[in-house]
């Protein structure tokens, strides 16, 4: 007896499946079993793909079987699908589905008890939530978009759906975009499903992750897996529901190889198993919203869950008007006054600034004009070495203007600031306040996840942070939100910059006015108060934003009207990168079905890996795009990203 096995180590450039003889002193193997196999002069692990009756070449036997239990059939199908859909080597894909350190002996822990679930009466739903729940269940397609405004109670719908699925004897996977959000959701779910929840995220040790993986593989009782993107790769038996919270988040796309979207994988899995997959979000991705409308798989929840919830009093502060900034250059007088009132009343203030806002702006200090590409409508990037503005999408170049083309003002700004500086300023202004900053620079024990209870209970007076603070947090003591520069993300040279700016602005404003405290204020500082994106975000007007961005995407040949690919190449010298990217460009431009941008330097052109140049590919058919990419000569320095959420 022989078996085809997918190794988890890339053994050659086109490596995929290897054939082995049956292991000694072992019975027949099942598809999906994890085994140890000889490979080259060493050993590695692999996943049994299928049984083969005979072969006409010499084979080595499988060394040993790691688990009697096999991976669920949908996992094996997902491995093959991901490899084909994203043109990724099978071994690299298979490796994602096995925990690091597999094969090591771990200390046993107490087995999970088989507890009863809470009754449905413990999950209160208002009339709007009941209607949304009924509509979700009536949709024929497996993937369904739950478009619920902030504070509408999407979590209660998740709870109710999960409870029904668990009662039917099936398991649930709930994805969250950030580790920082996990504590909040786990707390809510533990109140209803105590003892049946496993949490997966990158902060857990290798041993912890392996133990959870093994328990999941061997478990015969219904369970709930909560975690970030990798939770979807868990070997859950009898999966009955997938929920993706904050489904608009870019974190669901894996940037390192193999590059893939957890949303697409979740939809494939749901379709394969014929189970529901719920995309939940207050600000849907334009492409997902467009698809949901065309498939009649859209459910809208536009009513606040709490009667006491109120629309915050939002004040727009024009950053070009210096009269608002007589006390501090970064915080308006109005915002500072609100912070002072909150400190007296025991309320919290959230200061938000997008981390990426530290990227250089090319903007007029007087009228707010921005340097945009005339072809793509995207912000141009300043290249200081040649002192020119370049579009990283189409290759358009232009000189840096000496004065504003609109108002002729001589001061053109190229600068930015970050949250660390804001923290320093706040501590100078409010010496007795308890201040905490949460962003990508936080290390344990300063992370938001580790300090969630302090933040929620109001032990911190002023919270300063980036995108993490905008995503789904419910802070009972929060009374004021201050957005330091709402348009900072619009300066990025990316087709999705406007969409991300709208998402962040809508989400962070949704943290206040949730019905916990009497006060609800927001101060939005911006250089571009007349921007359609800023106005729509402030008013939480998704429909206006959707119509606006859809027309621009159509003109610019971007999703959902075209499929995208990003082909990048990295060498130690810029000359080598330019040479090889141009050779690929000459091959690509022969195609009459795929449109290619001129080769351009990547947004982060020079890193420790070398110099990176890229080509942006567009095609009306994804198959045309994939076929072209597969026809290109292989090169270990060449990297492909299909359907990227960003071109940076």
Image (cartoon, rainbow, N blue to C red):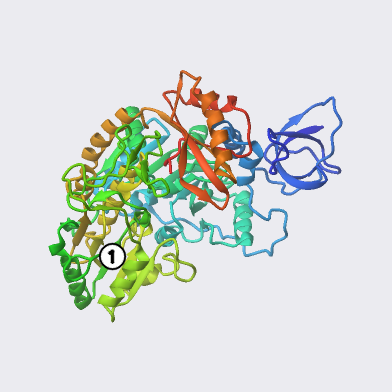
Q: Secondary structure at mark 1?
A: strand
Residue sitting farthest toward the left: 323
Dividing the picture into quadrants, the one containing residue 517 is bottom left
Front-most of residues 600 and 282: 600
Circle 1 packing at 10 Å, graded few (<14), some (14-19), many (20+), is many
Residue 301 seen in the current view: yes
Q: Quadrant of the C terminus?
A: top left
Residue 153 seen in the current view: no
Percent coordinates x, y for residue 306 in the rendering? 22, 57
Front-most of residues 487 and 411: 411
Residue shown at 29%/42% (left/top)? 132
Residue shown at 51%/49% (left/top)? 606
Q: Is residue 393 left or right of residue 14?
A: left
Front-most of residues 544 and 307: 544
Residue shown at 24%/44% (left/top)? 533
Residue sitting farthest toward the top: 592
Q: Quadrant of the N terminus?
A: top right
Using the image, determine if residue 110 lies above or below residue 127.
below
Front-most of residues 460 and 256: 256
Residue assigned mark 1: 350
Percent coordinates x, y for residue 46 in the rendering? 71, 43
Using the image, determine if residue 487 lies above or below residue 433.
above
The number of callouts visible is 1
Using the image, determine if residue 103 lies above or below residue 280.
below
Percent coordinates x, y for residue 217 in the rendering? 62, 49
Percent coordinates x, y for residue 605 in the rendering? 48, 46
Q: Is residue 369 left or right of residue 607?
A: left
Using the image, determine if residue 59 lies above or below residue 443.
above
Dividing the picture into quadrants, the one containing residue 94 is top right
Q: Is residue 187 left or right of residue 126?
A: right
């Amino acid at each position: 007896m022989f078996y085809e096995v997918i190794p988890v180590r890339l053994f050659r450039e086109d490596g995929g499946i290897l054939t082995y003889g049956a292991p000694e002193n072992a019975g027949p193997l099942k598809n999906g079993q994890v085994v140890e196999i000889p490979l080259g002069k060493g050993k590695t692990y692999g996943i049994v793909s299928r049984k083969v009756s005979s072969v006409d070449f010499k084979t080595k036997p499988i060394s040993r079987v790691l688990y009697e239990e096999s991976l669920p059939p949908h996992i094996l199908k997902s491995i093959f699908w991901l490899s084909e859909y994203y043109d990724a080597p099978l071994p690299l894909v298979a490796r994602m589905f096995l925990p690091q350190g597999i094969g090591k002996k771990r200390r046993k822990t107490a087995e999970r008890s088989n507890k009863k679930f809470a009754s449905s009466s413990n999950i209160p739903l208002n009339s709007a939530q009941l209607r949304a729940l009924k509509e979700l269940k009536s949709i024929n397609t497996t993937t369904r978009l739950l478009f619920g405004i902030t504070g509408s109670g999407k979590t209660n719908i998740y709870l109710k759906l999960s409870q029904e699925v668990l009662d039917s004897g099936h398991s649930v996977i709930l994805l969250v975009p950030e580790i920082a959000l996990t504590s909040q959701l786990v707390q809510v779910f533990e109140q209803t499903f105590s003892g049946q929840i496993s949490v997966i995220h990158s902060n857990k040790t290798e041993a912890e992750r392996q133990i959870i993986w093994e328990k999941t593989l061997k478990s015969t009782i219904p369970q709930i897996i909560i975690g970030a993107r990798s939770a979807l790769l868990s070997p859950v038996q009898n999966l009955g529901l997938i929920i993706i919270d904050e489904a608009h988040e870019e974190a669901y796309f894996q940037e390192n190889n193999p590059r893939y979207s957890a949303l697409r994988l979740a939809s494939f899995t749901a379709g394969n198993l014929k189970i529901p997959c719920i995309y939940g979000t207050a600000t849907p991705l334009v492409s997902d919203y467009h698809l949901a409308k065309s498939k009649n798989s859209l459910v809208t929840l536009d009513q606040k869950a709490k009667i006491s919830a109120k629309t915050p009093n939002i004040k727009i502060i024009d950053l070009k008007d210096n009269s608002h900034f007589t006390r501090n250059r970064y915080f308006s007088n109005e915002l500072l006054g609100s912070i002072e009132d909150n400190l007296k009343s025991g309320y919290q203030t959230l200061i938000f600034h997008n981390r990426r806002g530290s990227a250089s702006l090319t903007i007029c200090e007087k009228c707010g004009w921005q340097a945009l590409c005339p072809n793509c409508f995207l912000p141009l990037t300043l290249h200081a070495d040649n002192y020119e503005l370049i579009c990283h999408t189409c290759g358009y170049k232009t000189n840096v203007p000496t004065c504003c083309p609109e108002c002729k003002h001589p001061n053109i700004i190229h600068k930015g600031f970050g949250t660390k500086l804001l923290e320093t300023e706040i501590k100078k202004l409010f010496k007795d306040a308890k201040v905490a900053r949460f962003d990508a620079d936080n290390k344990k024990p300063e992370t938001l996840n580790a300090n969630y209870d302090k933040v929620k209970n109001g032990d911190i007076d002023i919270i300063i942070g980036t995108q993490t603070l905008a995503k789904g947090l419910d802070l009972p003591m929060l009374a004021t939100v201050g957005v330091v520069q709402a348009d900072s993300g619009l300066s990025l040279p990316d087709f999705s910059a406007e969409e991300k700016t709208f998402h962040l602005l809508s989400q962070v404003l949704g943290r206040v006015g949730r019905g916990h405290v009497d006060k609800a204020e927001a101060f939005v500082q911006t250089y571009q108060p007349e921007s359609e994106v800023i106005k729509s975000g402030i008013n939480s007007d998704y429909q206006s934003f959707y119509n606006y961005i859809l027309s621009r995407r159509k003109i610019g040949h971007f999703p959902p009207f075209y499929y995208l690919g990003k082909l990048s190449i990295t060498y130690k010298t810029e000359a080598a990168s330019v040479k090889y990217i141009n050779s690929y460009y000459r091959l690509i431009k022969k195609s009459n079905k795929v449109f290619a941008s001129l080769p351009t330097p990547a947004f982060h052109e020079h890193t420790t890996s070398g110099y990176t140049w890229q080509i942006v590919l567009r095609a009306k058919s994804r198959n045309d795009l994939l076929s072209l990419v597969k026809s290109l000569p292989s090169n270990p320095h060449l990297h492909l990203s299909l359907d990227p959420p960003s071109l940076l």
